């Protein structure tokens, strides 16, 4: 994953140093349109990580070690600082918390 981040940053330096690549099944991505975030993720970002940017970026990747690399489009979040990245990753990439009535 670090190699992917470095390749993205070299290809698009405006992303900055605090970059996260979202998996295709990320809860933050809209299932109906994966090129967008869910309204809940957008609201969370507006409140807790203003200035964060979601984009689709192309990066040269090999599907497995030793294979020929090919261009691949990945979903990328860029943040203003490490705290925003960590908060987003904790909230949106972990397993969702069960509702309070189920947790009891």
Image: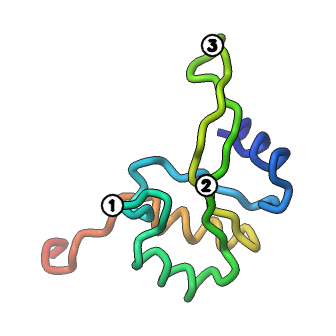
Labels 2 & 3 near each other (Cβ < 8 A): no
Q: Position of residue 18 (x, y in %)?
A: 74, 61
Q: Earlier in the sequence, mark 1 or mark 2?
A: 1
Give the residue at mark 1.
32
Q: CA distance from mark 1 to mark 3?
A: 31 Å
Q: Residues within 10 Å of mark 3 (few under 14, many from 20)?
A: few
Q: From the viewer's perspective, is 27 left or right of 61?
A: left
Per the image, label 3 sits on a secondary structure element best described as: loop
Q: Position of residue 1 (x, y in %)?
A: 64, 39
Per the image, label 1 sits on a secondary structure element best described as: loop
Give the residue at mark 3.
67
Q: Quadrant of residue 7?
A: top right
Q: From the viewer's perspective, is 37 left or right of 14?
A: left
Q: Earlier in the sequence, mark 1 or mark 3?
A: 1
Q: CA distance from mark 1 to mark 2?
A: 16 Å
Q: Residue at x 61, y 66 (%)?
A: 54
């Amino acid at each position: 994953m670090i190699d992917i981040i470095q390749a993205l940053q070299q290809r698009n330096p405006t992303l900055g140093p605090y970059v996260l690549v979202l998996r295709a099944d990320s809860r933050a991505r809209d299932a109906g349109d994966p090129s967008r975030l869910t309204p809940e993720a957008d609201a969370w970002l507006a409140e807790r990580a203003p200035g964060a940017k979601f984009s689709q970026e192309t990066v040269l990747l090999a599907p497995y070690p030793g294979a020929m690399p090919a261009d691949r489009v990945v979903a990328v979040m860029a943040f203003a600082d490490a705290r925003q990245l960590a908060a987003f990753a904790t909230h949106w990439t972990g397993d969702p918390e069960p509702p309070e009535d189920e947790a009891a």
